[in-house]
Amino acid sequence: MMNKLKVFQLLTAVVLVLGVQMSALAHTHMQMSSPKNGETVSSPTVMMLTFGGEVRLVRVEVVGSAGPVDIGFTPVAAVETRFHMPMPFLEAGEYVVTWTAIGEDGHSVSDEFAFTIDPNAPAAVMDHGDTHSHGGSEPHSH
């Protein structure tokens, strides 16, 4: 009986430790982007990435059908939850954005999303969800 209790306590401790680690990692994932994953838009002037917690954005690459697109990205030393990046004019076609961020816990998270450029499509809409940098809470185009 005592052995079963110790095994149960050990398993409970392992589950709690893993749960805390997983919740810490979950905060570094990207919550929103503009353009959004799978969205078809006209060429955006700005790309926005929003994360669930403060991160250092260390890599952002954009690749289209013609190859890599130079967006002039340099790794960011400061921790933020939202990043705005000026974008060059993008020709019609599909694009994949690959990013890497490092959370406050030191773990890096990488992922990607894709969007399509169609010159006849509407502009990408940025919904900041707050009054950050544009003085209003309404979504707007970029």
Image: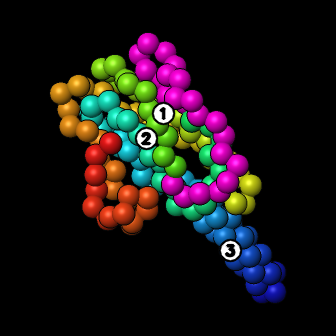
| Residue type, numbered disc 1 | Val
Name which residue type carries label 2. Answer: Met
Q: Secondary structure at mark 2?
A: strand
- The answer to which quarter of the image holds residue 44 is top left
The C terminus lies in quadrant: top left
Figure quadrant of residue 87:
top left
Going by the image, does 19 lie left or right of 111?
right
Q: Secondary structure at mark 3?
A: helix
What mark, if any, has residue 47 been given in the picture?
Answer: 2
**What amino acid is at disc 3?**
Leu
- Residues marked 1 and 2 touching at CB (< 8 Å): yes
Which residue does the image show at 43% across and 20% down from the upper left?
64
Colouring used for the render: rainbow
Neighbor class of circle 2 (other Cα within 10 Å; few <14, some 14-19, many 20+) is some
Which mark is nearer the camera, 3 or 2?
Answer: 2
Q: In the displayed structure, would residue 86 be above or below residue 93?
A: below
User: Is residue 78 inside the magenta stretch?
Assistant: yes
Q: Position of residue 52 (x, y in %)?
A: 52, 61
Query: Residue 138: horizontal and vertical position, in percent?
Result: 27, 61
Depth check: 13 or 69 in front? 69
Residue at mark 3 = 16
Helix, strand or loop at mark 1: strand
Residue interval drawn in magenta: 61-82
On screen, residue 81 above or below 65: below
The residue carrying mark 1 is: 97
Q: Is residue 37 visible?
A: no
Local crowd size for mark 1, using a 10 Å CA cut-off: few (<14), some (14–19), many (≥20): some
